[in-house]
Image (cartoon, helix red, strand yellow):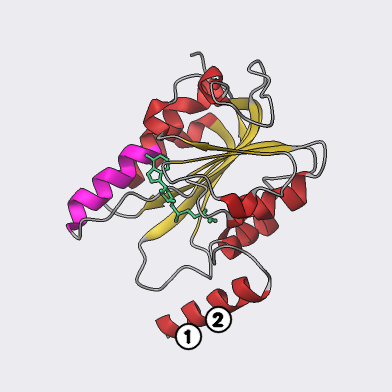
Amino acid sequence: MNFKVKDHYYKKAKEESYLARSIYKLDEINVKYAIIKTNDFVIDFGYYPGSWVQYCAKIVGDEGMIVGVDIQEINTKLKNLQNVLLLKKDIDQLNTIADLCTENTKININCANKFDVVLSDMAPKTTGIKMVDQENSLNLVRKVFDLLPIFLKVKGNIAIKIFEGGDGQNFLKEQKCKFEDFNYLRPKSTRSCSKEIFAIGKGYKGSKV
Ligand SMILES: C[S@@+](CC[C@H](N)C(=O)[O-])C[C@H]1O[C@@H](n2cnc3c(N)ncnc32)[C@H](O)[C@@H]1O
């Protein structure tokens, strides 16, 4: 069953020229919760190889923009996409929007503008030790939530991947009240062996930095 699911979404992504099967997770999230819309300014943490960037570029259109951040080398396969800015950075290096503006990039970011949508599909390198992997994943999630007051507009939306287990659920429960609407989704395209779920928040209430 697991391999059938993998084959189906893997092949579908290839046929549709997407860089990863993860596209179908974001598509399911967006069809159900409508978190990304035309003209949005989106930041995608852990964008590489870039299927979410490809997907968002189609939705946000010419007036929108996508910033992708990853520790991997910039993926040149995305170079023809308009209004996409890719940065090779560790999320731990980011503290302000100005930290996105320091590189020699083809698009200037208005450092005064917060994002309409914050996405994170970040996954740490796995060690095989369950508790260590859960904690490393949760640290990435914590960092994304720490950045929200600085990066996300009031009324903005999020979709953030987290691995089930450990302190993750408790941490997310504490974040719920920061949004008008907060849900969890395990997309159909998730491999059956994976522990990942997505936290989807709509209508960020904002918070003092
Ligand atoms: C599952 S992949 C993302 C797939 C992507 N959503 C797509 O559609 O192609 C997870 C990514 O998270 C990145 N990542 C892990 N730790 C990170 C960190 N500290 N800062 C930025 N990116 C990180 C990894 O390098 C990896 O490329």
Which residue is denoted by mark 1 in the rendering? 4
Secondary structure mostly seen in magenta is helix
Q: Is residue 132 magenta?
A: yes
104 versus 162 height, above or below? above
Badge count: 2
Q: CA distance from mark 2 to mark 1?
A: 6 Å
Mark 1: few/some/many CA within 10 Å (<14, 14-19, 20+): few
Percent across and percent down for residue 75 are 54, 50
163 versus 141 height, above or below? below
Which quadrant does the N terminus fall into?
A: bottom left
| Nearer to the camera, 29 or 179 | 29
Mark 2: few/some/many CA within 10 Å (<14, 14-19, 20+): few
Residue depicted at x 63% and y 17%: 111
Q: In this rendering, would 138 be left or right of 128?
A: right
Percent across and percent down for residue 101 are 58, 22
Proximity of marks 2 and 1: CB atoms separated by less than 8 Å: yes
Please say whether residue 29 is visible from this viewpoint: yes
Percent across and percent down for residue 205 are 59, 26
Percent across and percent down for residue 168 are 33, 45
Which range of residues does the magenta coloring cover? 129-141
Residue depicted at x 48% and y 50%: 121
| Nearer to the camera, 200 or 113 | 113
Quadrant in the picture for residue 8: bottom right
- Identify the secondary structure beneath mark 1: helix
Residue depicted at x 67% and y 45%: 35
| Nearer to the camera, 115 or 63 | 63
- Looking at the rendered structure, the kind of residue marked 2 is His
Q: In this rendering, would 188 be left or right of 80?
A: left
Q: Is residue 148 magenta?
A: no
Q: In this rendering, would 6 be left or right of 19?
A: left
Quadrant in the picture for residue 117: top right
Which residue is denoted by mark 2 in the rendering? 8
